[in-house]
Amino acid sequence: ANVASNHKPTKLNSQKKEFFGDNEDLEVYLVEKTEQLVALHMALLNALSDDDSIIYERPEHQNEGWRPHVTTQGEKSFPVGSTHISDSMYLIEAKNNDKDGDKIIRAKIPIGKQGDIQNSKFKRPIQ
């Protein structure tokens, strides 16, 4: 949580619609790689790299390969030209190497303020 509290809430700017996934059927909106967003990403990677228990199954999605995005959730999307101030980040666990789309939110972490990590009290798939 120290990483998050040492950064400010981050403005997200939606730039382009794309499709991710093995079948390219997962609708996402790419987010502008602002200096502030990249700094937060790199701080998170550095903090996580200190934990030997973390295994990166898709290292090609880190550093230069990182493509920040917002995934369309049912009727909720982040159309091109939209902006949002993100004051939280989420720790999401992908199941089955993310092949079937099942994910579990493990924690909500506030950005820019001291606070407890809010652990998910229930497992709920998100898509």
Image (cartoon, rainbow, N blue to C red):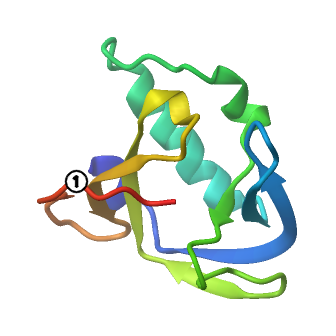
Judge whether 28 appears above or below 105 on screen. Answer: below
Judge whether 90 appears above or below 91 on screen. Answer: below
Secondary element type, mark 1: loop
The residue at the point 13 percent across, 61 percent down is 116
Q: Which residue is mark 1?
A: 123
Judge whether 104 appears above or below 111 on screen. Answer: above
How many discs appear? Answer: 1
User: In the image, is 59 to the left or to the right of 80?
Assistant: left
| Mark 1 crowd level (few <14, some 14–19, many ≥20, 10 Å Cα) | few
Which quarter of the figure has residue 107? bottom left
Judge whether 86 appears above or below 84 on screen. Answer: above
User: In the image, is 7 to the left or to the right of 66?
Assistant: left
Q: Position of residue 5 (x, y in %)?
A: 32, 60
Report if residue 1 is visible in the image.
yes
Q: Amino acid at mark 1?
A: Lys
Q: Position of residue 8 (x, y in %)?
A: 46, 70
Q: Position of residue 55 (x, y in %)?
A: 44, 16
User: In the image, is 53 to the left or to the right of 7?
Assistant: left
Q: Position of residue 13 (x, y in %)?
A: 74, 77
| Farthest top residue in view | 52
The residue at the point 44 percent across, 62 percent down is 7
User: In the image, is 26 to the left or to the right of 5?
Assistant: right
The residue at the point 69 percent across, 54 percent down is 68
Report if residue 6 is visible in the image.
no
Which quarter of the figure has residue 83? bottom right
* Residue in the foreground of this view, choosing between 126 and 13: 126
The residue at the point 30 percent across, 14 percent down is 53
